[in-house]
């Protein structure tokens, strides 16, 4: 097998995103054949690769099926594996995974709830997060203040933020009035607090923000906050197709997993 960059090989084997692997290398937690790994180092599965002293087996990954979880993140959880402040993380409620680790596909900030996808395939995660792919994300937003047609036009045409021009690809009025007016907005970037900053640029305040779709995957109806469900093969296949990756379906029919407690029905965010 031809050598590959260590970040790509470990990410594809489900040991984190490429950025996570780079951070592990910088921290000296990865060794190759007894020596500290270097970013971009060419390796093969035949090399002895260790993370935190544990040797990585690539055989388990070769047999593993690609999996994707949909998680309904509540407000107050951080999108990180370990938080120095001791706050709850999105990884706290996920099921155990043998031979790899769950990789978060993107992030949601502390005060944003909704759909967060996880996978055991680092290459899928990397492509879905890469800006060049322009994968759309859709959010339900509750806005305080009077929203005028001129504001909506500016938000669609582009607004100058401190880190460059930004805009929504689509804005749909979801109803309500006054302090309870909802919009569904779609954009294809993942800049920090971009949805909130766009509305704030018009003198408006976002009082609630919830991601309801990521690419072709919508937040499953009935999935309660803090719960997860495994996506069925048909939905996983659509994700792979969205980033031009071949999909290897499971050889036998296996019912997708869910969190243990059955979810109760939940309305899509919007006015009652």
Image (tube, grey):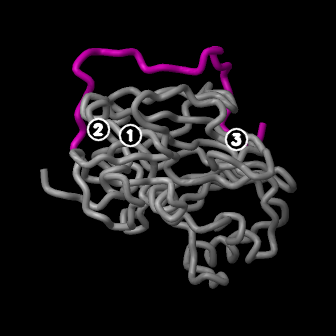
Span of residues in magenta: 246-272
Residue located beneath label 1 in the image? 55
Q: Specify the label residue 183 is tagged with.
A: none
The residue positioned 36% from the left and 58% from the top of the image is 7
Q: Which element carries disc 2, helix, strand or loop?
A: loop
| Left or right: where 19 falls relative to 55 | right
Between 8 and 93, the one nearer to me in the picture: 8
Residue located beneath label 2 in the image? 58
Distance between the alpha carbons at the discs numbered 2 and 3: 43 Å
Asked which quadrant contains residue 163, the reply is bottom right
| Left or right: where 88 falls relative to 17 | right
The residue positioned 24% from the left and 45% from the top of the image is 45
Q: Specify the label residue 269 is tagged with.
A: 3
Please tell me whether residue 264 belongs to the stretch shown in magenta.
yes
Q: Which numbered disc flags the more N-terminal residue, 2 or 3?
A: 2
Please tell me whether residue 150 belongs to the stretch shown in magenta.
no
């Amino acid at each position: 097998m031809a050598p590959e960059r260590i970040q790509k090989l470990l990410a594809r084997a489900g040991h984190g995103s490429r950025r996570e692997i780079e951070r592990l290398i910088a921290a000296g937690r990865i060794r190759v054949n007894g020596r500290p790994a270097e970013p971009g180092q060419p390796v093969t599965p035949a090399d002895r690769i260790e993370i935190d002293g544990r040797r990585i087996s690539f055989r388990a990954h070769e047999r593993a099926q690609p999996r994707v979880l949909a998680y309904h993140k509540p407000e107050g959880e951080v999108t990180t594996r370990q938080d120095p402040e001791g706050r709850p993380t999105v990884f706290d409620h996920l099921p155990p995974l043998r031979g790899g680790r769950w990789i978060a596909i993107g992030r949601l900030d502390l005060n944003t709830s909704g759909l967060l996808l996880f996978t055991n395939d680092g290459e899928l995660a990397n492509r879905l997060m890469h800006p060049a792919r322009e994968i759309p994300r859709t959010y339900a937003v509750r806005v305080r203040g009077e929203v005028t047609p001129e504001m909506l036009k500016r938000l669609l045409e582009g607004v100058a933020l401190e880190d460059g021009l930004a805009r929504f690809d689509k804005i749909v009025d979801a109803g309500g009035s006054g302090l309870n007016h909802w919009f569904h907005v779609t954009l294809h970037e993942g800049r920090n607090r971009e949805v909130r900053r766009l509305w704030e640029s018009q003198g408006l305040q976002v009082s609630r923000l919830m991601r309801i779709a990521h690419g072709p995957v919508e937040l499953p109806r009935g999935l309660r906050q803090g719960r997860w469900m495994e996506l069925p093969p048909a939905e996983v296949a659509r994700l792979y197709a969205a980033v031009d990756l071949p999909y290897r379906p499971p050889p036998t029919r296996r019912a997708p997993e869910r969190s243990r407690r059955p979810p109760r029905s939940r309305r899509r965010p919007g006015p009652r």
